[in-house]
Amino acid sequence: MNSLRILPLLFLTFLCTCVSAQKATPAQVRAQAYQQRLFLQEKSPAAGIEFTNIGPTVMSGRVSDIAVDPADPTHFYVGYASGGLWETKDNGTTFTPLFDDLPVMTIGALDVNWTTKAIYVGTGEVNSSRSSYAGNGVYRSTDGGRSWTHMGLDETHHIGRVIVDQRDQSTVWVAALGHLYGPNPERGVYKTTNGGQTWTKTLFINDSTGVVDIVRDPRRPNELFAASWERERKAWDFKESGKGSGVWHSTDGGTNWNRISTAKSGFPTGEGGGRIGLAISYEDNQRYLFASLDNYFRKSAAELAKDGDEDNLTKNKLRGMSKADFLELRPYQVQGFLRANGFPRDLSVDSLIARVTRDEVTTGQLVEYLEDANSLLFDTPVKGFELYKTTTNGEKWERTHNDYIPSLYNTYGYYFGDIAVHPENPTLIYAMGVPIIKSTDGGKTWTGANGDNVHADHHYLWINPERPDHIINGNDGGVNISYDGGKNWRKCNAPPLGQFYGIAVDNHPDGYRVYGGLQDNGTWVGPHNYRAGRGWEQSGHYPYKSLFGGDGMQVEVDPRDNNTVYVGYQYGNYYRVDQAADTSTFLTPKHELGQRPYRWNWQSPILISPHNPDVFYLGSNVLHRSVNRGDDFKTISKDLTAGGRKGDVAFGTLTTISESPKQPNLLYVGSDDGRIHRSKNGGAEWDRIDDGLPQNLWISRVAAGKHDANVVYATLNGYRNDHFGSHVYKSTDMGDTWVKIGNYLPNEAVNVILEDPTNPRLLFVGTDHGLYVSMDGGNKFVGMNNGLPAVAVHDLVIQEKEKDLIVGTHGRSLYLANIEILQTAAVEQPGLTLMGPSRLRYSGRYGSRDFNFEIREPETKFQVFLPGGSAGAKLMIKSNDGTTLFTQNIELNGGVTTIPYDMSFEGRFAGMLENKANEGRDPAKRPVSIKAAENGKFYLRPGKYKAVISVEGTEATAEFQVR
């Protein structure tokens, strides 16, 4: 296999994103897209714009896999679902990223040959969530992660396990799950004996069934066990189980396989067979094979009856209940049902019974009233987690526990599936789900292992074989370590790995704050000038604060008070939060009893009107508007989707809302099924305006122009169609017609477009692999990656006063870059431009040693925009009277160059500056003395200065002040 390299630029010139929206994107096109990304970054005039990560860190992000050094458990690697690969050598105190600039950042599995230090990484996580990005095969490093070689298996997309032979680093097994949003044959078990130069597919079931787990017997290394899983996700439906799911056994090193999970052997088979996790343990010479199962078969009526109080009326009991049986219920049973399930308070027992009697309401409608997408996550009566074991190589399986284990998986066991068993003690077992559960009797009984400080939703756990109470856990909140078997946990969340969905900023007078909703980590707010570090542990005050729980979603801030915030969690559950009072008010409108429920997207869109902050919009399958900050809502549209589709995922929902800042009541909405609608009169009438666009793609963003009421932008995302083309469009007639822009963007699914508020030529686009900018209104985009890894960008916002671009990533938290120079340079004929620092402050401690005996060095930056190619230049710092105090020869790149400056000047001017500083001094005050600092440098004192950049006779200036 070839190491990563850039394709010839001539080839890239002809690369375009014209793949049909209905076709899966092949691996070759994705590989070309990566080369195009590198080309757009290398030739970018915005390459000098530096990004700074502003956290947060404490909540981290979803972990896929961990590989622990058996000789030194303080050394381990962590693979994150969308944040890349990291290494720690100090037990999680610090981490180093190893995978930032590769074609993908999504990690599925990893393993290390600890003798040779060879690392193998399988890309593409297998948890099959809404943001489980597709990988592109296997990578190998032989130098500790400093460089990587792509070893093929590009079309596998999602890899559940990698096993490297500890005696021979060239022998590797891979569990390939395959595409998430479509069938493909590149799935099953793959094996190589030459380090990935060639691969042999040794187990294949069908093109909808892949392999999610493999274990190898440490005592009998020719014996392996594999878990197959049949699953296929659509935007509207998830087939979580099927006949292809099962357990397989090989006795010849993974060359041949036999299925050992059959109905006859006692292992559940058929359409209800879900995800399976495997583990091996020994007791003396007896081998135990354990298999966890997400059993998607439904519970029987008798089993459901055991789940609750016989006298209580529940939704499941009501389902299918006849009118006559309902009318026989006791009043307190009906009353308890109404109050427990949040029915309107004005619906009394007597009025409900009367309406049922008159056939105005049926028992089915009572059930339907409660069945939104969020409730179905928890209420669908599947059997869920079960643990089976065999000591006869699958001839006979037995379930280890008598009763069902509620709430470990709920209905989304596909998201978990990992178990951990001590290799020499089959009685010690951990099962991962929403909580961690632990058994010390071989799975018969279970207790929680969820001490304080450990997150929920668990995906990996390692047991130290030499010290069984020492465990390392990976979950949706990062990495945790326990030394007492899960009673107490320590977080290892130094890196910023938050998975943001939506972000916002305010205009707080003490410095603006950033807000964001994160996957499974709620909504947070923090200062824009935060830099990741551990200093806050000394004070006990982490700069970011949690505002709300659940899966954090979109955020809107009332611009009048910088205090009122609209936040929410999955499927349209939104609240208005008063930060000062620490109170929240539930806002989401509810359908009337007897009506079809509203359909809410996982990330339902919200918007504060740019014209009146009392007006608040919220989208389900219709658009809701409140004129009193969400206290009351009015539905102002018909169904603005194609009407929904049969399936177990909410679909036919709105995904994006925009109101023109130039024209009140000019509204746009987009949906997950490809519809875009416009209203010119505040929702009284609606027009469908997606003709001419690719159909049936997720509308990830519709954005009204900030400078021209006729302009509107749209981005379409084919991720859920197994299609990764870039679709960015612009209309100059309010959506009547559309023109594709960004024609040379790489084939990467697009999540967001943002028009700059000061310059309509400046556009930003965020994709599943990074950030791009156009300085000519969208004709040509270039990369922005200076300090920003190739991570999914889900949202963008500009803080207008400070001219800062905030980037919300789904895997590496938040990034900030000042874009003032781009706002100035994005003109038809840009000239030489120089931008100075906005504020500088003098300190008498500059140049001296700090508490850590390091020299305090101030640092500020100048930014230069140079049209055309590279050139030599001279930077000069001048006093207010024009004296040149400092000169530096520099090399400018075409576009933006950032020049660091340490506020020093040439010492021969110290006397002159000292005299000027003392002119007109009050004799009663101490005279100013300008001396060299401890490091021998002289630093600028308070005053006004001018920076000059000179390039081949052309000059640009910028004034700045030191206070």
Image (tube, rainbow, N blue to C red):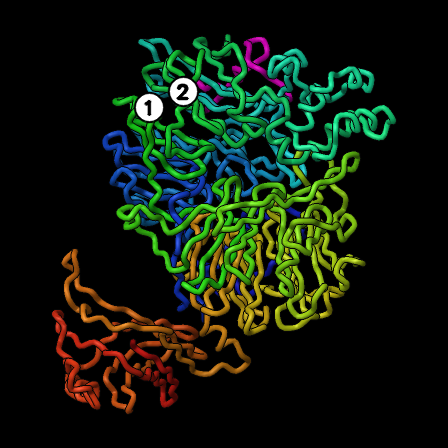
Residue visible at 21% across and 80% down in the picture: 905
Give 879 or 843, whichever is nearer the viewer: 843
Q: Position of residue 325 (x, y in %)?
A: 79, 15
Q: Position of residue 943 (x, y in %)?
A: 28, 82
Give 799 or 753, whichever is nearer the viewer: 799
> The N terminus lies in which quarter of the figure?
top left
Q: Amino acid at mark 2?
A: Lys
Is residue 39 something that shows in the picture? no
Is residue 134 something that shows in the picture? yes
Is the magenta region chiefly helix, strand or loop? loop
Q: Position of residue 597 (x, y in %)?
A: 73, 38
Badge 2, how many Cα within 10 Å: few under 14, some, many 20+?
many
Label at residue 485: 1
User: In this picture, is 244 found above or below 646?
Assistant: above
Label at residue 438: 2
In-image side of 645 versus 890 (left or right): right
SS class, disc 2: strand
Q: Amino acid at mark 1?
A: Gly
> The C terminus lies in which quarter of the figure?
bottom left
Badge 1, how many Cα within 10 Å: few under 14, some, many 20+?
many
State which region is magenta. Answer: 249-271
User: In this picture, is 933 found above or below 450?
Assistant: below
